[in-house]
Image (cartoon, grey):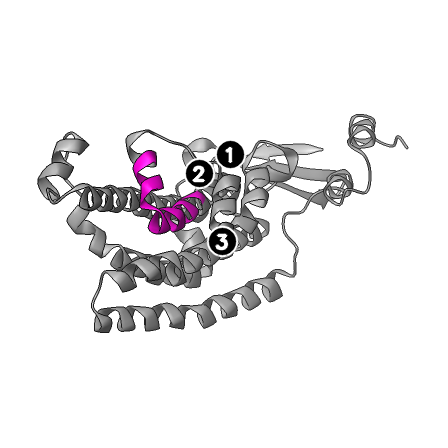
Amino acid sequence: MVYEYQKIEEVGSDIYEWYKGILLKERLLYGGMIELLLESAMPLGEYILPGGVIEPLLESVVPQGEKSKDKAYDKMTLSILATRLFNNAEGAKYLLLRGLPDQANMVIRDIIECVMLFRLFLKNPKLAKRWLMESKEYQLGDVDAKLSQMGINAREYAFYGMLSHEGHTNLLASLSHVQEKEIKGGMLRAYHFGSTRTPEAIFSVQQNFLTLFFLLHISLIEPLAEFYYQHSDKDSFSVWAQKVTDLFPKIEALVAEVNTKSGKKGVQVDKHILELIDKKMRLKEFKIRLLKPGAT
C-alpha cells in the first residue's frame, strides 16, 4: 500500500484551473438563484437597523403600539434568518468550489434550519419575538411538528437527517478526500489535505451542489415567495416569480446530466469500505477484516 499527499502550500495553487470549466453550469445557476434570494429579501431592508440596543431602536421605529412592535420584532428576526441563509449558501459554495464536499454538509444543513424557522416566524410573529428577545431555541423536529399543524409541508426537512449524518465525523462522511485505486504491485491511496480535486471527487461536489440548489429553490418558491408577495408591488413580484419558475427546468437538466455523466461512480474505495457502506456485514466483522487482511 502506497500513501501520498499533496503539499499544503500547493493546495490552493490550481483551484481556479480545476473548477473554471467543469463547474461552470453550477456556478452560473447558483449565481442566478442567489440574486433572486437577495431580491426577495429587499423589503426587509427597511427593518434592518444600525447597531445599538434593540428595544429603544424598535420604539423609535414603531411607536404606534404593541402590535406594530411585534411586527418589527418579526421583521428583524426574518432579516437575521435571511442574512444567515445567504451567508450559508455563500459558505457552501466556496467550500464546494475548493473541493471540500464533506465540510460543506454542515453549512448546507444549516440552510434547512434557516428556511424552516423563516416559515414558522412568517406565520407566528410571537415565536419570532421569543427567538429574538429570549434566545429561545427551537428543535427542528418541534418546528416541523408546528408547521405540520399549520398545514405546511416543509419538504426540506427530509434532507436534515441525511445531512446530519454526513456532516459528522464518521467513515461515510469522510471519503471524498480519500482516493484509492489499484496499481501494479498493490494499491495506491491518496489523502488530499486541504481539498480534493480529483475526477472521482467531482461526483461528490456536484451532488452537494444539487442538494444546495434544491434547498434554495424550495426557499424561493415557498417562504421567500410568500414574504415577497406580501411586501412588493404586483409587477415586481411577477417578474421575480417568472425568473424563479424558469430555474426549475435548468435544475432538472443539471440533475440528469450529472447522474448520466457520473454513472454513480463516486469515490473509488476498496472492498472492505464498500461492504461497510452497503451494510452487508456488521461493524465488528469489518474491523476484523480491516485489521487482519485475509481473515474470514
Q: Residues within 10 Å of mark 2 (few under 14, many from 20)?
A: some
Type of secondary structure dominating the magenta stretch: helix
Mark earlier in primary sequence (3, 2):
2
Labelled pair 1, 2 in contact (Cβ < 8 Å): yes
Labelled pair 3, 2 in contact (Cβ < 8 Å): no
Kind of residue at disc 3: Ala
> In the drawing, does residue 74 fall left or right of residue 59?
right
| Alpha-carbon span between mark 1 and mark 3 | 37 Å
Span colored in magenta: 113-130
The residue under the point 26% across, 54% down is 41
| Alpha-carbon span between mark 3 and mark 2 | 39 Å
Whole-percent x, y for residue 36 in the image: 31, 61
Is 245 above or below relative to 230? Answer: below
Whole-percent x, y for residue 175 in the image: 61, 40
Is 262 above or below relative to 245? Answer: above
Let me know if residue 198 appears in the view. Answer: no
Residue that badge 3 annotates: 154
Residue that badge 1 annotates: 193
